[in-house]
Image: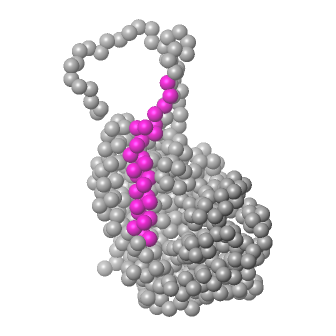
Amino acid sequence: MSKHVTHWIDGKPFGGVADRQGDIFDPATGQVTGQVDFADVAIVDEAVAAANAGFAEWRHASLTKRTQVLFKFRELLNERKGEIAELITAEHGKVLSDALGEVTRGQEVVEFACGIPHLLKGGFSESVSTRVDVYSIRQPLGVVGIISPFNFPAMVPMWFFPIAIAAGNAVIVKPSEKDPSAANYMAELWAEAGLPAGVFNVVHGDKVAVDRLLEHPDVKALSFVGSTPIARYVYETGTKNGKRVQALGGAKNHMLVLPDADLDLAADQAINAGFGSAGERCMAISALIAVDSIADELVAKISDRIATLRTGDGRRGSDMGPLVTGQHRDKVTGYVAAGVDEGATLVVDGRDVEPDGDAAGFWLGPTLFDNVTPDMSIYTDEIFGPVLSVVRVHSFDEGLKLINDHPYGNGTAIFTNDGGAARRFQNEVEVGMVGVNVPIPVPMAYYSFGGWKNSLFGDTHAHGQEGVHFYTRGKVVTSRWLDPSHGGINLGFPQNV
């Protein structure tokens, strides 16, 4: 039976009729499995009104109450994350183990947000003047929007909404229309956890919904993850409309391998970071920089490992699944053709893959290029697919310069056994997230996620303490109390309520 995904507004599924809808595909079969409603301006306005009403109640909830709801949501998420993973595999295509890992990493931010009483503590200075005290507090913003991409339909929204909700805000999530079901499932978990109606809402759709969130005067802040051109548009449009915006854009992540590195480890991690989730990760390694004589051996090791990978339906135990849509698959194969035309050496051609799945699925196997140069499109552009390009350089300095000259600065990694080289690299590389013998340096929830240069618009990264600051604003109170007050007698043990 074809499924129908609609909006979640004011604590329940939307009851109206959508004028427009989009198809939901199973990438492993190429078949349409359902429809998702697209929001118009009026539906977005209804969600904002519900969020405003929810915020009016939730902002005054005690930290104890908020934490209790967060802990309950965390427990429900942990119990049912396998079901969310199945939804992700069915709509995105990534293999089940990868989908489960996505939910688990998102859960880390929920757990971080459970510590909100500590995270919101301000400072206090007694008697800065005669009988005058000064203290600082942080308060919620109001209604905040989250616009998330298709590649992580559960984890990326969870980078933002646990902290936003814990801080006392109300949230509207606009997930990708390609894989919308995970957001609705999480909305149901929030309701079951006891979150008041209106505090967590989901609107589905396209640019119409995005633009209304960017323009609506009652939306105070927006978090976005997606391609750089759209991230720039979201940042510029949102800030023009007086909103606080964090817009995380695209990436071209490099992996610099020095001659002293463990090449077996480097080859394994190049496979993991280059082809996990079919390369549809903003932290995927897509450019491997090999220094000096190791290039031939490293390319051979990677090629051998690719031959052992099984591409197929993510529900069948495959190593790598399909791409998210046929249109995106065709875009990526276009880059493969361009790489050949531009003179790169095609070592492994993923277009020849024989998948363990329906022939109509959106397949492209792991693809490996050698002798790639910085002027080729497969190097300059974010491909967002299972295409790994090997660039040969003569020195550490040449490799470092190559990374620093690239307009993206999201993530990078160095593989070496030389502590001095690693220390210099982490100090001098112009990238926001750095791995040393770690290929996908996604920070833990209590640190912040985000890049430099064209990989981030705005000055605040996701989650961690920066996330808490993004979803709150500071206030400093200077007070003088001339007379003591008396609260009466109560011999009961004090309780948090």
User: At 73% across and 72% down in the image, what residue appears?
Assistant: 291
Expressed as whole percent of the image width and height from the top left, the position of residue 157 reads 46, 58
Q: Is residue 103 above or below residue 290?
A: above
Quick one: 142 or 111, which is closer to the camera? Answer: 111
The type of colouring in the image is: one colour
Q: Left or right of 300: which side holds 361?
A: left
Q: Quadrant of the C terminus?
A: top left
Q: Which residues are magenta?
A: 98-124
User: At 43% across and 88% down in the image, what residue appears?
Assistant: 357
Is residue 78 visible in the rendered image? The answer is: yes
- Give the overall secondary structure of the magenta segment: helix
User: At 33% across and 53% down in the image, what residue appears?
Assistant: 73
Q: Left or right of 460: which side holds 483?
A: left
Q: Is residue 105 magenta?
A: yes
Q: Is residue 159 magenta?
A: no
Is residue 409 visible in the rendered image? The answer is: no
Expressed as whole percent of the image width and height from the top left, the position of residue 486 reads 31, 12
Res 267 quadrant in image: bottom right
User: At 34% across and 74% down in the image, what residue appears?
Assistant: 3
Expressed as whole percent of the image width and height from the top left, the position of residue 351 reads 58, 88
Quick one: 252 or 427, which is closer to the camera? Answer: 427
Res 452 quadrant in image: bottom right
The number of discs equals 0
**Residue placed farthest to the left in the image?**
492
Quick one: 298 or 148, which is closer to the camera? Answer: 298
Expressed as whole percent of the image width and height from the top left, the position of residue 272 reads 53, 73
Q: Is residue 483 above or below residue 195?
A: above
Res 227 quadrant in image: bottom right
Q: Quadrant of the N terminus?
A: bottom left
Quick one: 99 or 227, which is closer to the camera? Answer: 99
Q: Left or right of 63: which side holds 417?
A: right
